[in-house]
Image (spheres, grey):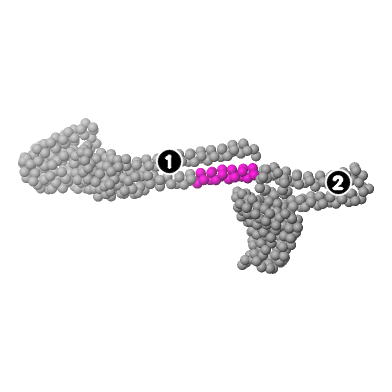
Amino acid sequence: MNTQKYKWIFYLISLTIIATIGVQFFWNYKNYEENKQRVANEIQLSLDNAVEEYYSLLAKSNFLTIINADTKSKKLRFTSDNSFDTIFKKLRRNTKKIGKPKVTLSNIKITSDDNLSKEKIDSIMLDTKKFVAEFNTTKDSILKAKYKIDTIESVTQFIDDKKGIHLNKNGTQSEVRYFKGKAAADSLKLIGNLKPIFISFLDQSVDYKKIDSLIDNQLLKKGIDLSYSFHHIKNDTIFKQTKDTTLVNNNFAVTSKSTYLKDFEAFKLYYSNPNFEALKRSFGGIFLSLILSLLIITCLFYLLKIINQQKELAAIKNDLISNITHEFKTPIATVSTAIEAIENFNVINDKEKTQRYLAMSAVQLKKLHQMVEKLLETATLDSEQLLLKKETVDVVTLSEKLVYKHQLLSKTKELIFSSNIKPIYLNVDVFHFENVISNLIDNAIKYGGNHIEININAILKSTEITIADDGNGIEKNQQEKIFDKFYRVPKGNTHDVKGFGIGLYYCKKIIEKHGGTISVSSHKNQTIFKITLPNA
């Protein structure tokens, strides 16, 4: 593959990985921020719901219904003509003007089952305001001492004590009856000829434990697990705060929007940092995004690895073709020259020359045959077609003969053989085992130094065979590749050392088929190949 194209592919894959990570990060961050806002909105809703529920329960429990006991008389009607003000003016006739009971519009809510127009409702509210103003100017010391007309108990007690109210214009007395509770009021609404007055009292005090309980319930429903502090503020001053008083960060606070609150007061809820809660809600998306990103990045890196392997294979293929061409060219050229000499230079009559040329051709053809056999044999190593013919032999004697043969062929190299014991018997295929040992010794002679040591040691249940030389060593990044098929350590476009790059690959496959292992360790001025085989 062209180096420039490979670089462009690498840049494109890198850009894709960066873009994938960037998009996933942006998407997750946006999702996280949305969840943070959602948590804040749900906390706001929880506070509002808790406050509304608190005052709703309070209003239902302090609910009073007043009716005229004389059901035949229809004098007691809640209309603009016979309003709340008129009724309580009659109520006030039985008192002496001395005290100042506490009655305010804020803690009294008046309703009726009449379908009133807006004008009539406005008239009722105006009469109610007049009643509050006039009633609060009463100077009845007895009333002041005994009654505070600001709760449902005080109103009912007042009615019980007075035993009735003069309501009629002609001076006759009509008895007034009252019923406590919202359920009674709902039942009275079903009676057609009754026109009751409904009074709901809102307590001025706040039950903070109850509000905290309602807030806890609302947060639990929404699955929010945060610490918080409830603040009751009056005139911009903290009147009461509950639970964790250290929570004062206004960035994590919400204010109740309830209509039950007065203008000068507010309910605020301070809560702990919601980041973890938002992360919990975003976890699913973050996890899926992470898995997706990892899958994409893994696939891209795998693709890059495959491309790199293809590039290396292409280089190995080119090197192999070059080596095969060179290796085959020499014997073919030699044989061709010998035949040409026999044909053109009339050497056929010279039996001695003819014999020499024929012998030379036979040697080269035998060499060519061995190279072809090696290539064909390599093709069978990865399959099950290669069957070993194992037999128990003394590997010490076998190896010693091989060392002696190589020593005769390499006069300039020093080969030293040793073993810890004799004999050492192993169950091996003699032909392939000899090839493995010969290949390793031959490599040490070709690429190593002048001093080569072959050592065999029997240890426990295995036998170790080492071939060490004092050459320049093999670079660390090349050590894992030298056992690959057709791989040769790159040294430029030189062919001073013959080979196809299949020797060490062949050794590895044969040793593995014997149930053993082969490894290499190399550093400056020393390279050691070690074979480990199980004992017979």
The C terminus lies in quadrant: bottom right
* Dot 2: element: helix
Q: What residue range appears in magenta? A: 291-312
Name the residue type under label 2: Ala
Residue 387 among those drawn in magenta? no
Please state which of residues 228 and 331 is positioned toward the viewer in this rendering.
Answer: 331
Determine the image quadrant of residue 460: bottom right
The residue depicted at 79 percent of the width and 50 percent of the height is: 368
> Residue 187, position in %: x, y?
24, 46
The residue depicted at 67 percent of the width and 53 percent of the height is: 449
**Residue mark closest to the camera, 2 vs 1:** 2
Return the mark for residue 338: 2
Determine the image quadrant of residue 512: bottom right
Residue at the disc numbered 1 = 29
> Residue 528, position in %: x, y?
64, 56
Return the mark for residue 499: none
